[in-house]
Amino acid sequence: MNFDFSDDQKLLKEQVRKFLADKCPMTVTRRVLEKEEPYAAEVWKGLVEMGLTGTAIPEEFGGLGLGALELCVIAEELGRAAAPVPFSSSIYLAAEAIKLFGTKKQKETWLPKLASGEIIGTLAVSEGTHAAHPRNIAVKLAGGKLNGVKQPVADGGAASVAIVAVNTGGPNKSKEGEQAVSLAIVDLKAAGVSAEPVRTLDPSRQHVTLSFKDAPAEILGDKAGEGWSQLSRVLDGAAVLFAFEQVGGTEAALEMARGYALERYAFGRQIGSYQAIKHKLADIYVKKELAKSNAYFGAMMLNDEGAELTEAAAASRIAGTDAYVFAAQENVQTHGGIGYTWESDCQFHYRRAKLLALAVGAAIQWKEKLVSRLEAKNAA
């Protein structure tokens, strides 16, 4: 069985890498972070012009009609560059939710605009520091009006449309003790919606608090009460794509650490010749390869809508988070005192690693999800 990408997919990866190396060096990420821009507009424009925002959107809705594997190779390069753009929010999450569960009219309304980059989308689930669950979704949709607060919401300030997890009232008929949850489409430019910036560890990716007060909204799809299962599927797919971002970031951090270890001398020797540094780099490499193998399996399940997608997504997420956070920390350590300074670029992968570790749920949530799935399969 061949788990590798095709020649066309590798060519796409190479083109994206060249573009980001030219148009999105760390100086761009530093500028966005220091000036608190919502995102790097020129990088986003370039990605749109390359057609990347329409990669997995069907041709009938203005996209290229490619698949999940093409998104995976793009995600890896975005992670390598720590690109300060809203690609994940708009494409992995909002566009994917509409593509999978929207009505034909909803797809015709929103997907062409997302594919062309005319608008940016996002997903709003969290309502604070606690993990979202059907029992604690407080944002309520009734009579076509939305009320409540979501925070933090990635790229919520730049987005024009959001897919929002909402309480639609009444009990969940399939699970006792839980309330009915739906996904709703909300035009963020409509009346009744306000956004306030939220400070995070990585300001190069803007997060906001979204407040809704009688904001107009409509159920995603044609049936209310199925939002939690829909959300789970969207997050499974996003987990695989974020895992590829984490693999790309891990590789970049490893290359940064290796490069410094070969050029920095101490006591007349390259610091890379010391066993302590060798061990650091070797440990990063091992974690990176483990994350990569899990991400590749996740990509196969996502592309084929395999029966083991949930398990593969959880494993990808866990391994990717572990590898990227470890690599980012060890990159700082390899650089020594200079790695902690504002002038060092080490901070950007450290910031992004910590942010991605929470992007679609913390690692502990994905571990619990993986264990529960495996227990259920063993009990069957």
Image: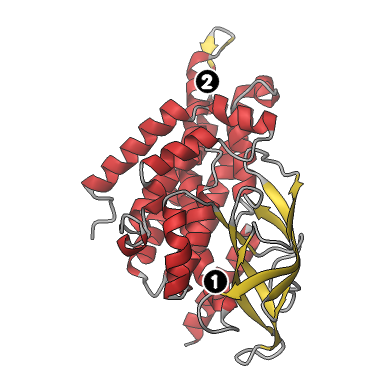
- The residue furthest front is 191
Look at label 2 and name its amino acid. Answer: Tyr
* Residue 214, placed above or below residue 81: below
- The residue furthest top is 268
Look at label 1 and name its amino acid. Answer: Ser
Res. 239 visible in picture: no
Labelled disc at residue 332: none
Check disc 2 and report the residue beneath it: 260
Q: Residue at x 44, y 47 (%)?
A: 75
Q: Nearer the viewer, residue 377 or 226?
A: 226
Q: Residue at x 54, y 84 (%)?
A: 223
Q: Residue at x 48, y 70 (%)?
A: 106
x and y, in percent, of residue 302 in the image: 39, 64
Q: Residue at x 46, y 38 (%)?
A: 45
x and y, in percent, of residue 155 in the image: 62, 49
x and y, in percent, of residue 229 in the image: 54, 77
**Quarter of the image with the N terminus in it:** bottom left
* Residue 163, placed above or below residue 320: below
Check disc 1 and report the residue beneath it: 232
Q: Nearer the viewer, mark 1 or mark 2?
A: 1
x and y, in percent, of residue 301 in the image: 37, 66
Report the colour scheme: secondary structure
> Relative to 64, is 346 on the left or the right?
right
Q: CA distance from mark 1 to mark 2?
A: 41 Å
